[in-house]
Image: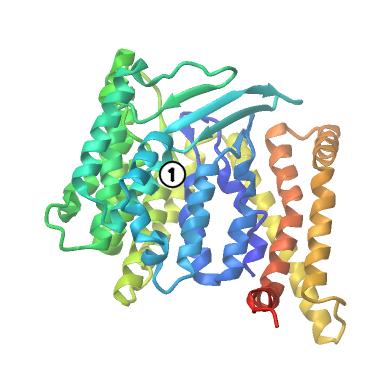
Amino acid sequence: MPWVLVPILPLLLYSSPVFAGVSLSLPYLFIPIAALLGRRYGTAGFMTVLLGGVLALAPYLETSGGTFGGGIDIYLIAVWVCRAALSNDPVGALIGNNSFWRSPWVFAAVVILLPLSLFFGRHDLQDDIVVDVYISMLSLFFFALFIHGLAGFRTAWVVGGLAAATLIGIFLGIGQLLPAGGMEVRYHLDDLATSAAGLGYFFAGRIVANMDDTRNPWQHPYLTIAGFVLLAVLSQLTWAFLPELPPSADYVGLYGQYLALPLAALMAGYLLGYGGIGYALVVTIILLAIANAGSLLLAQRGLWVHAEQPLFCIAFGILGVRLRDVQTGGARAWPGGRWYVYGLVVLLFLPALFSWDELLKLVWPFIAALGAALLAACLEWLRRRLKLQDVTLTGEGWLKLVIAIAVLAAIAINARTLFDSLLGEADALDLPIEIALPAVLVILHLPLAYLARVLAEVWPKIAGDVRSIATIWRAPVG
C-alpha cells in the first residue's frame, strides 16, 4: 500500500530552522526514497512519488517552524529516477536516448541554463508566513552531468566546457547577473567547488557505465570519496577556522559544495558496498567533529551541524549498493543489526542537542504525518473487510478515477479557503504555527493519497483501454 505514504512524502521537502546550532534539511532524501518506491512497488510506487511530491512545485513557504516546498529540481530528479527504477535495466532507462545525451548542443544547454536560478520576490502571508518565488536547477545540472557520463559523452568536452563556463561565471559580474525587470538571476557555476562537483558527477556516470575506465578518478574510491566528503563539509570547516574570509573567497571554492555528499555516498555504496557506506559515514562525522571542535576551542563560533548529512551517507549509499546489485544481478545482505544499534544511539543523543521543547517541535510534523498514514492504512483495512463481506463500492475503472479527481479538484479549487480556515482553527486552539502548518499540509494532502490509491488499483484497466483506443485510432479507415 505505497499510497499511504502520500501524506508523508511532502515532509521530505521540509527544512528546519537552526536549533542550538543544529539544522535538518530533508529534500534530497526524496530521491533515494523515490527509487526505492519505484523498484519495490512498480507503477503504484511511481504514482505515489508523482502525487506525494507535488508540494515541491509550490513556492518556498517560510515560517518560524521551518521551510516547505520549492524543490522543483529535486521533484523532477525523483520522478525520473523512480520511473527508471521500474525498468529491468535502470541505467538504460535513466539515459533513454544515447544520441540525445551525446549531443554537444544538449551539453551546452545544460551548462548554460541549468546552473541559473531565478528569484521573483518575497510575499508576506498571514501568521508570519513568507513565500519566496524562487526557482533553482543546480541539482538537476549535476544529475544531467551524471547522465552525460552514463551516455558516454566525450570527456574532453565536459572538462573544457565546465572550465570555460566556470571562468565566465566568475568574471562576468562575479557570478551575479543584473536584475531583469522584477526578477533576479544568478549563475551558480561560479566557483571551483561547484565545477569540481560537476566533474565528479560526470565521472561517476562514466564509471557506472564502464568500470574499465582507468583514467577515471573513481578508480581510487577511498581517496575520491574522502575528497568529495571534504568538499561537502568545507563550508563548516571554513566557518570554524577561517571566519573572516573576504567575499571573493567564495569563487575560489573555499565554501565547498553541499551537493558533493550525495555523490560521495552514492559512489561509496556502488564501489565498496556497505563497508563503503560506513567509510563515508565515518569520514563525514570525523570532519564535522573537527569543524565543530575547532569552532568551540577557538571560541569563534558555536555548533554548526547539518543533521541530514549522516542520513545522506546511508540513503544514497544504499541507493548505490542497489544500483550495483541490479547491474550485476547479485544480491547483498541488508546491514547487520549493529547498524540499527548505531541508529538507536543517535536517537538517544538527540535530546542532548535539543531542549525537549525544541525536539518536540522538530518531530511533531513527522508524528502528524505518521498518524495520517496510519489513518489511511486503517481505511484500507476497513475497505478490505467490507469486500470480504461482499460489500463493495460501486463503480470501477474510469468511474472510480473520475470520482477521485472530482474530489481532488473540488478541494483544490477551495484550497486557499480551506488553508486559511484550518489555520484559523489552529490559531483558535492556540497551536504554534510550527505545529499548525505541517498538520494543515498533511490534511490537505490526504485527497492526493486517495487519488494515488485509486490510480494504483485502476491504472492497468485504464492503460489497457487507452492502448485499445490508440490501436483503433491508428487503424486505417475501411
Residue 134 in which image quadrant:
top right
Q: Which amino acid does label 1 sit on?
A: Leu
- Counting from the top left corner in percent of width and height, residue 228 is at 26, 42
Whether residue 86 can be seen here: yes
Q: Quick one: 396 or 52, which is closer to the camera?
A: 396
Residue 307 vs residue 242: left or right? right
Q: How crowded is mark 1: few (under 14 residues within 10 Å), some or many (20 or more)?
A: some
Residue 135, how many percent across, how many down? 54, 34
Q: 58 or 20: nearer the eye?
A: 58
Point out the image quarter for the C terminus. Answer: bottom right
Left of 268 or right of it: where is 343? right
**Where does residue 475 sit, x and y in percent of width and height?**
64, 79
Q: In which quarter of the image is the N terminus?
A: bottom right
Q: Is residue 477 above or below residue 429?
A: below
Q: Tell whether 391 sits left or right of 89.
A: right
Rendered residue at 60%/53% (across/down) = 9
Left or right of 374, for residue 234: left
Q: Which of 341 and 306 is in front in this view?
A: 306
Q: In this view, does 216 lie above or below 478?
A: above
> For this rendering, which residue is in front, 215 or 282?
215
Residue located beneath label 1 in the image: 140
Most extreme residue toward the front is 478
Question: At which x and y percent is residue 20?
Answer: 49, 29
